[in-house]
Image (cartoon, rainbow, N blue to C red):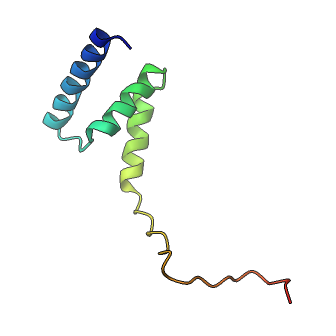
Amino acid sequence: MDPEAARTARESLDLAFHMSNILDTGLDRHTLSVLIALCDLGLNPESLAAVVKELRTEPPLPPPPSSATPTTSTAPSFLP
């Protein structure tokens, strides 16, 4: 990407992020950038908005088990 195009893209994202903050969407800059890129690829913005809303209503996943904590396998062992 040439420097002028990169500057224009950055300014556009800055403007969209500012508007997002005014509307109190709760989207961070990276998420907004990904959503804009998906729209640029032709995905339906209303469908993306519905997915974001749905993901926000789902409870968070539990944290993965710590590598320091030994895990026990429930699978049968075929080794002697």
Q: In the drawing, does residue 32 fall left or right of residue 60?
A: left
Residue 64: x and y, percent?
48, 69
Residue 39: x and y, percent?
42, 24
- Compared with 54, 13 (above or below) is above
Quadrant in which the C terminus appears: bottom right
Q: Front-most of 77 and 50?
A: 77
Residue at (38%, 14%) from the top-left corner?
A: 1
**Extreme-left residue of the structure:** 22
Residue 44: x and y, percent?
45, 26
The answer to which image quadrant residue 31 occupies is top left
- Compared with 12, 29 (above or below) is below
Residue 17: x and y, percent?
21, 31
Residue at (48%, 25%) from the top-left corner?
A: 43
The answer to which image quadrant residue 9 occupies is top left
Residue at (24%, 19%) from the top-left corner?
A: 12
Q: In the drawing, does residue 19 fall left or right of residue 31?
A: left
- Give the tally of numbered discs: 0
**Extreme-bottom residue of the structure:** 80
